[in-house]
Image (cartoon, grey):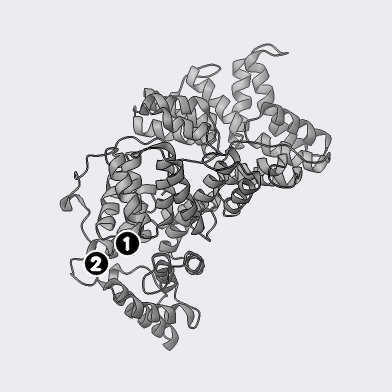
């Protein structure tokens, strides 16, 4: 599912059985008990609310028992009449997302999920988190928003997965198996568990759910929850692609391009990329942009490259946003426009993409804006400059407090390195501590470094991990890489290779080549490294 290019091997296929799956909420063979229903509209005196509840319960019962078209009728009544029923809206979104009783429509699914989320439906939080992170045709990626929805889903806890669990475990609904597996895959509403994720994905695939088939292929392709098996990956991708599943079409194209489980065949790769793109798949659109930019298997065409990049970028895919920014900034297949190029670079950067661009007219306000964006990352020069700009009021309102905020870290660095002042780790530690408590990521890293080495303070590796974690949460690839190293070596924590790989993955996705190099050693697969660094499009998706 996620764009994690390096995955540890999971459990051996078949190590999960019915006994290892959590007990169903209810033992009733056809319907869960009343207390197992998700929070709905409060039942109070009043015919309208009672009617909404009745319509919802009838629609829910019909849906669980496979009478999808009739279920949609009752759920639509409950969702649209009066003030609307939150859970009915969420289930309508689910019906549109998976084509249950209605024509498949991601945009309509998104619309109903958003209404349901306003009414505090935890199921809607989970599905919006998925759609915003991975995207689907006509539904834009926004990974910042995705994290916000995930946080809401996790805050709701068990309520997030209650309906999915009932629908999957008690009623054996294919789409519910898939969506429940996603929750275990991403740790949304439940503890992350790749073995259980694969278990539910496989049950969905066995029931011929196209997305279930596709994600099982992805699991085999990446070795996620099962041993890696490229032949099985191709088998499941093909089944899903032939059922119209656009992500599997893209993955087949990628496999043919790279020779994964099949012989390299650019003609076949382009066929599947084009078919996937015709469904509006942003990953395939970006891949076609790269192929036309480089002239791989097609005549080089900068105009088509920019066109495909733009289609994908407008759907929120960070790689495409960065690629399109490069085209715009350099006049590659489109009119040169430095300001617009900077805009798209910024869009990619907000979602964690590390490649940067420069190109705005000389303007103090705009200069301040871009320097501030770089300073919030890990640019020493930008952070030093930003403190000066606040002190002098250049491009911003003069603010000595903010100037001091940035200066604390800079002075601490001078003290640790003895640049222009006498080296003093104790004073540096105090300055880093002040800035770290104000959420300054660079200070958090420097503070953690001193704690790890015991310079200017008592050595405390556990506290160091805490501060590296705080910096990582703000997007610091340096902190992510260091956390990977500490978890790999068991410094300040119990050694945990899976956690180490996860942190290395996050750092690698932000362009940290040291993390990428370490991952190659750990997974012994240099092809994956090439995908991240050399190619203009990502590896397989789900």
Percent of width and height locating residue 273 = 47, 49
Residue where numbered disc 2 is placed: 171
Percent of width and height locating residue 34 = 28, 73
Tell me whether the residue at label 1 lies in contact with that at label 2, contact meaning CB atoms closer than 8 angstroms.
Answer: yes
Q: Is residue 482 left or right of residue 326?
A: left
Task: Say above or below: 61 vs 141.
Answer: below
Q: Is residue 390 left or right of residue 44?
A: right
Image quarter for residue 424?
A: top right
Q: Residue at x 41, y 81 (%)?
A: 52
Q: Is residue 423 visible?
A: yes
Residue where numbered disc 1 is placed: 176
Q: What label does residue 197 carry, if any?
A: none
Q: Residue at x 75, y 39 (%)?
A: 359
Percent of width and height locating residue 160 = 38, 59
Disc 1 on helix, strand or loop? helix
Total numbered circles: 2
Disc 2 on helix, strand or loop? loop
């Amino acid at each position: 599912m996620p764009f994690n290019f390096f995955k540890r091997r999971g459990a051996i296929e078949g190590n999960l059985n019915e006994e290892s799956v959590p007990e169903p909420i209810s033992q009733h063979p056809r319907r869960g008990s009343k207390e197992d229903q998700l929070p709905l509209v409060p039942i109070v005196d009043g015919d309208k609310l009672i009617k909404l509840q009745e319509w919802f319960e009838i629609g829910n019962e019909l849906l669980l028992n496979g009478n999808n078209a009739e279920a949609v009728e009752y759920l639509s009544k409950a969702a649209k009449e009066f003030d609307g029923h939150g859970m009915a809206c969420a289930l309508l979104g689910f019906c549109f997302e998976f084509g249950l009783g209605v024509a498949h429509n991601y945009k309509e699914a998104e619309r109903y999920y958003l209404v349901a989320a306003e009414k505090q439906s935890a199921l809607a939080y989970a599905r919006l988190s998925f759609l915003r992170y991975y995207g689907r045709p006509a539904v834009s990626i926004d990974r910042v928003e995705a994290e916000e929805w995930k946080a809401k889903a996790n805050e709701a806890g068990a309520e997030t997965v209650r309906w999915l669990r009932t629908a999957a475990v008690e009623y054996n609904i294919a789409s519910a198996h898939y969506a429940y597996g996603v929750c275990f895959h991403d740790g949304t509403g439940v503890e992350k568990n790749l073995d259980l994720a694969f278990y539910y994905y496989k049950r969905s695939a066995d029931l011929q759910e196209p997305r279930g088939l596709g994600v099982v292929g992805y699991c085999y392709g990446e070795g996620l929850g099962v041993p890696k098996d490229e032949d099985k990956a191709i088998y499941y991708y093909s089944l899903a692609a032939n059922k119209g599943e656009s992500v599997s079409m893209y993955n087949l194209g990628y496999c043919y391009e790279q020779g994964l489980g099949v012989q390299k065949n650019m003609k076949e790769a382009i066929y599947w990329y084009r078919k996937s793109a015709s469904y509006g798949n942003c990953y395939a659109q970006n891949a076609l942009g790269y192929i036309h930019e480089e002239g791989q298997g097609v005549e080089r065409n900068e105009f088509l490259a920019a066109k495909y990049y733009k289609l994908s970028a407008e759907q929120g895919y960070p790689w495409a946003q960065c690629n399109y920014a490069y085209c715009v900034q350099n006049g590659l297949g489109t009119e040169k426009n430095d300001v617009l190029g900077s805009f798209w670079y910024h869009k990619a950067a907000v979602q964690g993409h590390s490649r940067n661009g420069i190109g705005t007219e000389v303007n103090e306000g705009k200069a301040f804006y871009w320097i501030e964006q770089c300073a919030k990352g890990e640019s020493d020069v930008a952070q030093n400059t930003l403190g000066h700009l606040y002190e002098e009021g250049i491009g911003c309102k003069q603010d000595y407090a903010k100037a001091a905020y940035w200066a604390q870290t800079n002075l601490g660095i001078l003290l640790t390195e003895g640049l222009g002042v006498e080296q003093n780790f104790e004073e540096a530690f105090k300055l880093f501590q002040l800035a770290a408590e104000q959420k300054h990521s660079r200070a958090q890293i420097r503070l953690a470094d001193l704690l790890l080495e015991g310079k200017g303070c008592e050595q405390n590796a556990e506290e160091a991990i805490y501060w590296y974690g705080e910096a990582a949460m703000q997007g610091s690839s340096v902190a992510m890489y260091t956390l990977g190293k500490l978890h790999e070596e068991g410094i300040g924590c119990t050694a945990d290779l899976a956690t180490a790989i996860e942190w290395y993955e996050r750092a690698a996705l932000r362009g940290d080549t040291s993390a990428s190099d370490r991952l190659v050693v750990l997974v012994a697969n240099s092809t994956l490294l090439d995908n991240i660094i050399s190619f203009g499009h990502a590896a397989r998706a789900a």
